[in-house]
Image (cartoon, rainbow, N blue to C red):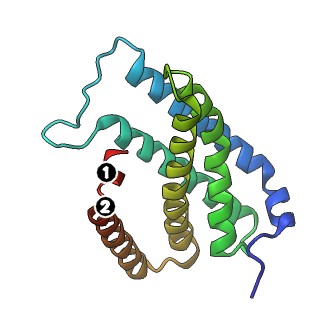
Amino acid sequence: MEDVVDYNTTIKHIPILLKCGTLLFIAISFLFWLDEYSSFGLPELVPYTPIKLYGTLIIGFTITILIIGEKAILKKDASTNVWQLTLLGLIMFVIAEVPFQVIRAFSFDSDRIGHFLHGFVTNSIFMAFVSFFIAFQLKTKKTGKLILLIVGFAIVLKLLIELFPFIRNN
């Protein structure tokens, strides 16, 4: 079995990781400003749904940039396996998320460290799964299996929310 963490693989992709991480940081910071501080008056919800617009935009931009970054990595080195690609996608996300969560934490009056840790940890765990789904699809092109994985993930997530209701409130 190949090593999941191959430092040479990570090092040779640093320019892609930094480029995509910086682009993602700019995108989510702009969306945060647009949602919290601008006078554009964006709606809170996607019209006619209970889905929050801000979260939908964040996830949309993040998935798009992860796909672009992971495709660029595969183009540069086709031998990168699914787990390495997942880890590199997560690194891209973390490069953007750490400075963003620092900025976001300062928008709160109290418990800034708690807000930082909660935002960083929960988003990173969620995006690790998303990065895996993207890596799996790009590397294997097995859409049927990907759909089963996503459905399984959604079921497990729903069960966790039902078993631990405090997850929904955080």
Of all residues shown, which one is farthest toward the left?
48
Viewport quadrant of the C terminus: top left
Residue found at x 38% / y 81%: 144
Q: Position of residue 8 (x, y in %)?
A: 87, 65
Q: Is residue 161 left or right of residue 69?
A: left
Q: Are marks 1 and 2 in contact (CB under 8 Å)?
A: yes
Front-lying residue, 136 or 44: 44
Viewport quadrant of the N terminus: bottom right
Residue found at x 72% / y 72%: 80
On residue 161, the disc is 2
* Secondary structure category for the residue under label 1: helix
Q: Is residue 102 left or right of residue 61?
A: right
Q: Position of residue 73 (x, y in %)?
A: 70, 60
Q: Amino acid at mark 2?
A: Ile
N-terminal of the two: label 1 or label 2?
2
On residue 34, the disc is none
Q: Amino acid at mark 1?
A: Arg
Residue found at x 75% / y 62%: 76
Picture quadrant of residue 152: bottom left
Q: Eyeballing the image, is 58 above or below 133? A: above
Residue found at x 78% / y 56%: 13
* Secondary structure category for the residue under label 2: helix
Front-lying residue, 130 or 104: 104
On residue 168, the disc is 1
For label 1, count other residues whose C-alpha is less than 10 Å away and answer few (under 14), some (14-19) or many (20+). Answer: few
Whole-number angstrom distance, CA of label 1 to CA of label 2:
6 Å
Picture quadrant of residue 37: top left
For label 2, count other residues whose C-alpha is less than 10 Å away and answer few (under 14), some (14-19) or many (20+). Answer: some
Of all residues shown, which one is farthest toward the top?
39
